[in-house]
Image (cartoon, grey):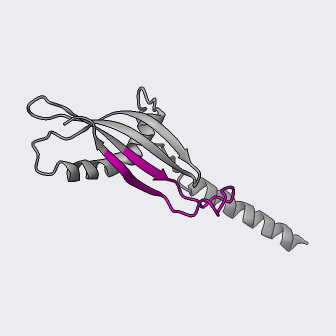
Amino acid sequence: MRWILLVKQCLCLVGSLLFAFTVVHTVNAETIPEVENSHFTTEDIVSDLVMPTIDKRVIKEYKGDDLFGWEWQRIVGIKYNNNHSYDIDVKINIPSKDNNDIEDLVKVRVSPSCDSEKINKQKCNHDFNIEIIDYKHLSR
């Protein structure tokens, strides 16, 4: 019985010494500057998704012309399709050097992934995809 008491005392002594000589580290969290006015609209989110696809098509449409690029004007329509995709009509502006700006209408189909169990697999059987389905020159 005495040896059990002796073992307990030794363990307590070793534990106390380890605790006393262990260096205590403090970790300071890095502060991230807050973004001021971080308000995003649905149009901001949609533009982030479809902008690269529209950009490729505008470059293809106006290859070789003296244009400055293109600017997003606004979404003029969103239509939900039966296969869990969305057709989004976007009006864009293409400024030119001679101040005769060009206005185009781009119809983009955004197809979210169908990997949710809540979606009807017979109607929705596609992966995430963004494609241009129509491009119209409104003024030129």
Residue at the spot 11% in from the left edge and 46% down from the top edge: 65
> Residue 129 sits in which quadrant?
bottom left
- Residue 63, percent from left and from top: 15, 51
- Residue 32 in view of the camera: no
- Residue 60, percent from left and from top: 22, 53
Could you tell whether 98 is left or right of 85 in the image? left
Residue at the spot 53% in from the left edge and 63% down from the top edge: 126
In the current view of this chain or complex, which residue is farthest to the right?
1
Residue 126 lies in the magenta stretch: yes
- Magenta span of residues: 107-135
In the current view of this chain or complex, which residue is farthest to the top?
37
Residue 84 lies in the magenta stretch: no
- Residue 100, percent from left and from top: 14, 30
Q: How many marks?
A: 0
Residue at the spot 34% in from the left edge and 45% down from the top edge: 51
Could you tell whether 96 is left or right of 11 in the image? left
Could you tell whether 103 is left or right of 2 in the image? left
> Residue 36 sits in which quadrant?
top left
Could you tell whether 48 is left or right of 118 in the image? left
Quadrant of the image for the N terminus?
bottom right
In the image, residue 73 sits, relative to residue 25, either above or below, namely: above
Please name whichever residue, 134 or 27, is drawn nearer the observer in this view of the structure: 134
In the image, residue 140 sits, relative to residue 62, either above or below, namely: above
Please name whichever residue, 72 or 35, is drawn nearer the observer in this view of the structure: 72
- Residue 127 in view of the camera: yes
Quadrant of the image for the C terminus?
top left
